[in-house]
Amino acid sequence: MTPLKINDFVRELYATNDFIPLHAPTFQGNEKAYVTQTIDSTFVSSVGKFVDEFETKMEEFTGSAKAVATVNGTAALHAALYMAGVRAGDLVITQALTFVATCNAVHHMGAEAVFVDVSPKSLGLCPKALDEFLQEHAIQTEQGCIHKQTKQRFQAVVPMHTFGHPVELDELMQVCSKWNITIVEDAAESLGSYYKGVHTGTFGEFGAVSFNGNKIITTGGGGIVLCKSAEAGAHTKHITTTAKVPHPFEFYHDEAGFNYRMPNLNAALGCAQLEKLEMFIGQKRALAKLYQSFFEKSDLTFVTEPEYAKSNYWLNAIICPDKESRDFVLQETNAAGVMTRPIWQLMHRLPMFKDALCGNLHNSEFIESRLINLPSSPLEIQSL
Ligand SMILES: *Cc1c(COP(=O)(O)O)cnc(C)c1O
């Protein structure tokens, strides 16, 4: 397969000779109307009806007991880790193949990220690799699961549903319950993705979703914490809103809180975007099908959803035979105005995480050197 053919195919899909971005948001519904309403009402900031409405609608959509809207996905992860009991000095296991936000949130907690391999099936945290890593490095004690030598607690495991493809959750939950470690899902990329019919982000004690401009729906910037119980949800809301104890005029805060609340202005955009979410998912799954059949007879492997999952196909991806062919495709597509992108460099290669404890990262390294993301903006139904 030559890059030229990819360029032609993508240009035909999007029916344009202009630059084709990786993922652009679309605003064709009530976005303007709702945002204007917030301005007219003056409630643009931390109080307003759209925040409550957005949280309720997200609960309905995901089946989460309580959803707490935040300023961005990283803040949602930070708050989720705090709620999961992660504290300074703890170890938090995640995948080396992720976006840096996952590890930044761990770092901001004063904890240390530990990197384990991904599964080729999901591109997310591999349950088998996790179990093997823990067998080598961890022991169970009355204080929980701790590192054999340093005695640091393994307080949380953070799987990330890469490009919207759900990780092997049954197996992962089994390993985590065996080792007595809490799961916090980084579901930033997987709004509208289901594991065996259940929405991602609702399996762990907490899940974090992002509404950044390039995600499947956007609030400009924003995120949400999905909580497993109403009680944990109420506490999450409390700590993300300065931990102020409700009172008509007194200011009293009963713990060190965050100011992570999503502004009403952003929630208004989110409410309008949510009305289009089912349509976006349909469009993105249809687009993925077209890519899949295009790459079927080529030497490039299109990444498909695992058999147990329904993915939102947030970003479409192919795996090249080797790094040289990957670099060639990246070069020729970008030069022609068709935006493609390599996957993130592995986290332990970044200067701030270079000393992190790592397991065997064989699959992560393989994927890192070969994967390319393709233009994935939702396509208009009528052009399909
Ligand atoms: C987008 C993203 C986040 C959070 O991003 P924000 O830009 O802070 O909303 C976290 N993790 C992953 C894997 C992401 O892709």
Image (spheres, rainbow, N blue to C red):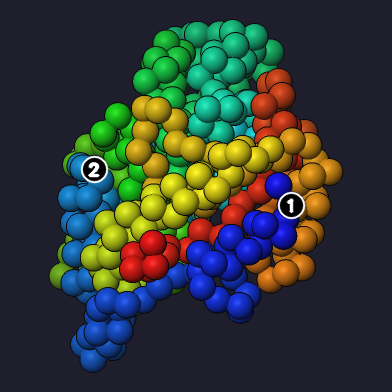
Please report whichever mark, 2 or 1, sits nearer to the chain's N-terminal start.
1
Residue at 59% across, 33% down: 95
Foreground pick, 82 / 114: 114
Ligand 1 has an atom within 8 Å of the beta carbon of the residue at disc 1 = no
| Amino acid type at mark 1 | Thr
> Mark 2 highlights which residue?
64
| Amino acid type at mark 2 | Ser
Q: On the rendered structure, is 275 left or right of 176?
A: left
Residue 217's place in the image compared with 146, above or below, is below
Q: Which mark is residue 2?
A: 1
Q: Residue furthest front?
A: 297
Q: Position of residue 349 (x, y in %)?
A: 78, 40
Q: On the rendered structure, is 63 left or right of 71?
A: left
Foreground pick, 210 / 342: 342
Within 10 Å of the Cα at label 2, are there few (<14), some (14-19), or many (20+) other Cα atoms?
many
Q: On the rendered structure, is 172 left or right of 342?
A: left
Q: Does residue 259 show up?
A: no
Residue at 44% across, 55% down: 287
